[in-house]
Image (spheres, rainbow, N blue to C red):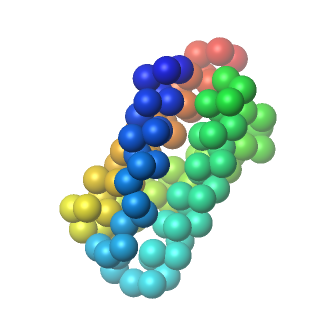
Amino acid sequence: MDSLRGEWDKLKSRPFPRSGFVSDDQRGELAGADSFAAGCILSFIATGSLDNTRIAVLKGCLTDIERELPALSAEAKDYFERFSEIGKSIISQLRETR
């Protein structure tokens, strides 16, 4: 859990990418995914678990992020790849405990 918290702290110390998006719609969609997934990640870090609703939200956000990755600039892609890795790590940890 400490390594996950460290990775999260490193990612959140970076600003949200300001450029590298194909369109304003794409930027908005990824900003929403960032925000909703962040809530789930913070909840997991605080409690070590997620309820089924938060699991579904996190999975949906990761799907949105993964779909948009190929079209992003290097800066935005790096940010969201790291974000996705953290989310996937949480999903994996939850599978192991169920």
Looking at the figure, which quarter contains the C terminus?
Answer: top right
13 or 38: which is nearer to us? Answer: 13
Q: Which residue is depicted at the point 62% across and 24% down? A: 94
Q: Which residue is depicted at the point 43% across and 30% down? A: 6
> Which residue is the extreme one toward the left?
74
Left or right of 67? Residue 64 is right
66 or 43: which is nearer to us? Answer: 43
70 or 85: which is nearer to us? Answer: 85
Left or right of 11? Residue 93 is right
Left or right of 19? Residue 48 is right
Count of number-bearing discs: 0
Whether residue 67 is visible: no
94 relative to 70, above or below: above
Q: Position of residue 15 (x, y in %)?
A: 40, 60
Residue 35 quadrant: bottom right
25 relative to 5, above or below: below
